[in-house]
């Protein structure tokens, strides 16, 4: 099982990640309290330990911006949280070969066929809503959704030390955590270390 810690935006966060060694970390380039500039992300990327994969988080960003960050080695994957459609993904793939995670907001009336039809993406990410809400969604919907899913998925939305075992029992490709390892809006070293350890020792 893999784990992604999203929303690193301070130098201390990089240090905590280097100590905890999650599989992925997320740099948020979309408007957010955790948003980074390309310059900040580049400086943090240099300090990131080998073995941790940096993911860029975007919402309807210009494809040229994503491609530039990938080509410069600042990100290794792109996570798309907006209204990106097949035409958008095709345009991005023309510019670079960045692997893609498409975020899907699980909500009442959500059409699962929309996600299942996007063959050009490499992973899906199922979340409660906009990233970093700190709230879970009804995980019961996943059984129907994943039965027909042909792509691995990240499970996000309100995952923390209290519910990580239940999240792992659903057997996603990876769990994605942001506010669940924070205290007062910033990353908490102890929580990061603990959650990564729980994932590593889960059976």
Image (cartoon, rainbow, N blue to C red):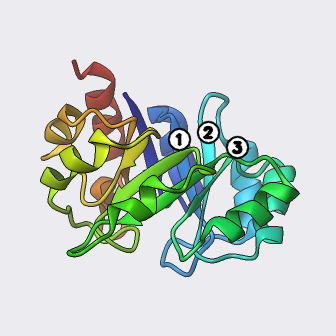
User: Residue 143, relative to residue 134: is it above or below?
Assistant: above
Instruction: Provide the residue designation for mark 1.
Output: 24
Q: Residue at x 32, y 53 (%)?
A: 181
Describe the element under mark 1 as helix, strand or loop: strand
Q: Earlier in the sequence, mark 3 or mark 2?
A: 3
The mark found on residue 125 in the picture is none
Q: Residue at x 17, y 53 (%)?
A: 139
Q: Is residue 134 visible?
A: yes
Q: Position of residue 85 (x, y in %)?
A: 60, 70
Q: Residue at x 37, y 68 (%)?
A: 132
Which quadrant would the N terminus be assigned to in this image? top left
User: Which is more foreground, mark 3 or mark 1?
Assistant: 1
Q: How many marks?
A: 3
Crowdedness of circle 2 by 10 Å Cα count: few (<14), some, many (20+)? Answer: some
The quadrant in which residue 190 appears is: top left
The mark found on residue 47 in the picture is 3
Q: Position of residue 169 (x, y in %)?
A: 18, 32
User: Residue 72, relative to residue 4: is it above or below?
Assistant: below
Do the numbered discs 2 and 1 sit on residues whose CB atoms are within 8 Å?
yes
Q: Position of residue 195 (x, y in %)?
A: 29, 38
Describe the element under mark 3 as helix, strand or loop: helix
Instruction: Provide the residue designation for mark 2.
Output: 53
Q: Is residue 17 left or right of residue 70?
A: left
Crowdedness of circle 1 by 10 Å Cα count: few (<14), some, many (20+)? Answer: many
Q: Is residue 142 left or right of residue 34?
A: left
Q: Earlier in the sequence, mark 3 or mark 1?
A: 1
Q: Earlier in the sequence, mark 2 or mark 1?
A: 1
User: Is 152 or 174 nearer to us in this picture?
Assistant: 152
Describe the element under mark 2 as helix, strand or loop: strand
């Amino acid at each position: 099982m893999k784990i992604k810690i999203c929303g690193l935006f301070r130098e201390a966060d990089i240090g905590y990640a280097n100590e905890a060694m999650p599989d992925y970390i997320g740099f948020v380039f979309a408007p957010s309290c955790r948003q980074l500039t390309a310059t900040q992300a580049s400086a943090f990327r240099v300090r990131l330990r080998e073995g941790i994969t940096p993911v860029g988080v975007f919402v309807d960003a210009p494809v040229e911006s994503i491609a530039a960050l990938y080509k410069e080695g600042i990100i290794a994957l792109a996570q798309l949280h907006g209204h990106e459609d097949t035409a958008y993904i095709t345009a991005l793939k023309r510019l670079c070969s960045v692997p893609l995670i498409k975020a899907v907001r699980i909500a009442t009336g959500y059409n699962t066929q929309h996600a299942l039809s996007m063959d050009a993406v490499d992973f899906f990410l199922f979340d409660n809503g906009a990233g970093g809400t700190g709230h879970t969604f009804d995980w019961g919907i996943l059984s129907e959704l994943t039965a027909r899913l042909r792509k691995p998925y990240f499970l996000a939305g309100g995952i923390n030390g209290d519910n990580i075992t239940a999240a792992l029992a659903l057997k996603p490709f990876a769990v994605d955590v942001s506010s669940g390892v924070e205290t007062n809006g910033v990353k908490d070293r102890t929580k990061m270390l603990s959650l990564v350890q729980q994932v590593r020792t889960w059976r």
